[in-house]
Amino acid sequence: MQCTWTSTTNVLRRQPWRLCSTQIRILTQCRNLSWTRWTSGAASSSGKRDLSSVANAFLANAIRDTSVPPSLFTVPEDLSQGEEAAKDRSLNHDSPSPAKISRIAAQAVRVACQGPSSREAFLIVKSLRKSAGYYGKPQEPGSRFPKNIPIDFGMAVSPRLATHSLLHGLVRRGMTKEAGDIARRIVLHQPEMRLSCRTLRAISTALCQTDALALRDQNFRSKAQKAKSYFGGYLARPTAITESKVKLPCTRVAMQLFFAAKQYRKHRAKQMFQQLIDACLLQGEILIVSFLLAFLVKQWQARFLLTDKTDDYPSTSADRNVSHAPASNFTLKPEFLSSTLSYIIPIISGDILPNPQAIRPSHEEAVQSLAILAGMLHEGTLRHNHIDGLVKTLVLFDPSASVVVWTLRKGKKEKWERRRAREYFDEVLDDLFDQVTGNFYGMPKGKSTYWANVETFNSLLNYSFRRKKSPAMAEKVVKHMRRVGGNLAPNITTYNIALKASTVLRRYDITRRVIETLRERPENAGHAIMYTPSEQPRQVCDRKLQKESTVAHASESSLAASDRMVPQQIATTELLPAALKSPTNPFVPEEIMERLSPAVQRIFLEEFDLETLSSTKRPLPADGDTLASYINYLTVSGRPEAAVELVLTLVPELKDASYPPGTPDSLRLGRGKRAFNRRSAILRAVGLGALFFSAALNALVKAGKTGLAERAWRLAKTAEGCSWNPTYRVRPWILPCAVYTLMMKLYAAEARKAYRSIQDPSAAATRGRSDRALVGWGILAFLRHRSTRQSANLLEISRDMGAYILRSRKLSEAAYRAQLSSYLEAGGAMPDRRTVQLPVADERFYNAALDLFGRVPGSYLPTRKRASPRRLRRLERRQLDYFMQRGSVRFPQDSRLISLLRAMREVGYEIPVAYRHMLVGVDLPPPTRPASHSRRKGYASRIGLARSTRLYTIKERGLPVQNAYKLGRPRAS
């Protein structure tokens, strides 16, 4: 209930008076101010104006040091009694009631809090409490009112309204911590004084906002982040989980207030709990948030069990007198779990946090918090309609991570054990799979409503394919979804997962069945999934593309719906991989099947009922994920030329060469036509998105189309910047680091063809062979070399374009990180992480860059990839000794390679052994990122011979097989 404030300033202005010397002496001696003394003193003082009421005298003393503008409030007539106040209180029936005195005292407290000091407000509240305690019980003969209390009200006046005024006044003054401490003491030690839920929420909001405002200071946030980093070592002890607490004081008081209200069954609103979770996430206390969610779930479970047990028994009068909190307060809302996962996921994956001003917890804390939530799922305390985000996070957890977490031993309470996070998550998911694929899972008796949703089943389908690599488990999930039907029927996401996962596992029978099902749907009549590659695919070459007509372009309406653009269909036969031609085995030839491991053989031997992927009544409109998965299928199945043909049909403008301005070919094309082609290509590219360009560039690189790949790369970078422009009305997207890795590998492959030289495109055009200009790539780098009269060989052109990719990735990461941070600080929602992923360099990117820049003539680098690490370490010691003696090195230093190695060192990666001698005499700055940014294993791995020139990488996709040259290689007899 909100306090009804009344102004008392007009009370002081209505009848001015002067205090007599006796009254002033009493006040200065801090004696108690009684009603009878004030009335008798006012009656006996001759020549003085009578006090209007005892309440006025009380207010005059309470707010004597305040200066508040007067208000239009008028004193009621029943408060102005004059000389009647001198009569005995027991005989005076017109004296102010306790309720009126309580309202006036609350107004006095409010006015006192607005002054320079709040001391008078505390005195009034203290006097009210003591008066209520003294006069509220039978008085013993000879007892007196305590002398150290400033005001004696002479009756029991409830201090509840004045206490609420004091709490709100302290909050307005900015004394949030003091208000929280007072509220917590009242809830714990004075439960009879019922604090309103609105007051508790106001105090909790002020406490959480105080620390949030403090974190906006960069210096304070850096200090808090440094203090937070010391907590990582505590996770090595199981008792540290119970010893963790919030570091900032105001949020800690808010949490204590919340649990104090819980102990005495105070009403806790949903907003109060959400504010507490947000404050803890802002301070990086991810473990505290996990414990809060576990506490809330336990409360809901206890309430649910108590309701079931008490329904079978008749209610008694004692049961009716017990106050219970509403059951809705103990329900775990989906937004509580989703907000927690929104912080756990970027910490594990290394992305930016939803709030850039938040303190970033350590990787171990995030994984431990995820383990706590997984334990709640394992125990069955989470409702199945809330677990879709949690299950997806557990499925996508890095399988190569070796983080160890603390978990409760199953079946034994308070028994903690250390386990690998990935193994524990697999156990939780396996148990959940057995539950949800049964007839009844986690449901109360007598109820037949399924609690799980379709997103949970899609996550389990992805888990069956990608993690367990079991088509039989995936078949169970799809069959169960079709059997239940309704909202659990397979949707387009289900078919996208099956299409993508079966392509990775080389189960092309499942892939073809998914494609056929989507082609049968009438809503996909205009989508690229209807494209069928030709039986004898044309060899897509630059010369032929130059001769093809590029006049036909899409209309403006088709450009707006770029994700629905469909190439022209070609009535040909379906593509068949070479592995499907074996008569005895439909997937893999027998001579290869015998050499595979049992885990890989199970992928091809397990049966999958293709009828489970037949069409359903639910609409299945194909989207951008379907298009990207289809392009990847064409590329992986051995037909990258067909994928290139599909890409060129979707974006026909790529057939035109993007000549630099001023060349003869650019002048030959009309300016209007080139401008129209560019605008239409950008409109198409902006709508296609990052997933399409990732798949398209992969197909172009695998097909060896360097010129096409370079033009597609330039178009993708232009469309990437335009997607953040609100005029295009599309969701913004960012090219991932995998795209930069593809381009770096492409130029590294071209650098190995150093015996070739790039022909002059202008000379080729003058000789009557204009198509030779389209064969070349790196035209901008070639023109730069020609302007400086340097030799333009293939190696230098490749290195120049690789340097451009390095610079583009670094600038894009910094620019989009700042843009995304400003967007989130302005209150924007976190975009989809699949399309908005910062291009943070990983091991594969640096390995591709080392392949391009690592070969420096005369730098003593090994000529073979399998060089001995012992020889390389000996080379490093020799170079170090030579530098210590003469102060110089004996080999030429490449500035690009040194910059690349410095960048690797800066982000926390270890320099490979083959390049450590290159850093002798180079000043290396300390890493700006923690060492956990690089991949770590739980055991010491042997330094392999093939990894002396590369960073250690783990195969995360595809079949768990060895390299192709090792598979089935005959041994020497």
Image (tube, rainbow, N blue to C red):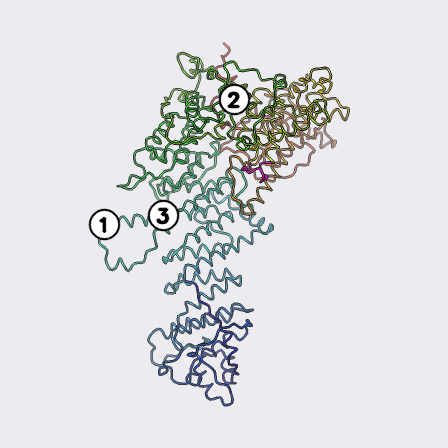
Q: Which residue is mark 1?
A: 312
Locate residue 423: give its quadrant: top left
Q: Is residue 217 left or right of residue 636?
A: right
Identify residue type, mark 1: Asp
Q: Give percent across and percent down for residue 923.
A: 68, 36
Disc nearest the viewer among 2 and 3: 2
**Which structural element holds mark 2?**
loop
Query: Which comes before the other along the chain, label 1 or label 2?
Result: 1
Locate residue 589: give its quadrant: top left
Q: Give percent across and percent down for residue 504.
A: 47, 24
Q: Give percent across and percent down for residue 488.
A: 36, 34
Disc nearest the viewer among 3 and 1: 1
Q: Is residue 727 magenta?
A: yes
Can residue 952 be seen here? The reply is no
Crowdedness of circle 1 by 10 Å Cα count: few (<14), some, many (20+)? few
449 over 577 or under it: above or below: below
Crowdedness of circle 3 by 10 Å Cα count: few (<14), some, many (20+)? some
Cα–Cα span, label 1 and label 2: 69 Å
Q: Which residue is mark 2?
A: 568
* Boundaries of the magenta span: 722-732
Cα–Cα span, label 2 and label 3: 59 Å
Give the position of the N terminus as an image quadrant: bottom left
Identify residue type, mark 3: Lys
Q: Residue 455 versus residue 885: which sits nearer the camera? A: 455
Q: Which residue is mark 3?
A: 298
Query: Which comes before the other along the chain, label 3 or label 1?
Result: 3
Query: Which comes before the other along the chain, label 2 or label 3?
Result: 3
Q: Is residue 695 magenta?
A: no
Disc nearest the viewer among 1 and 2: 2
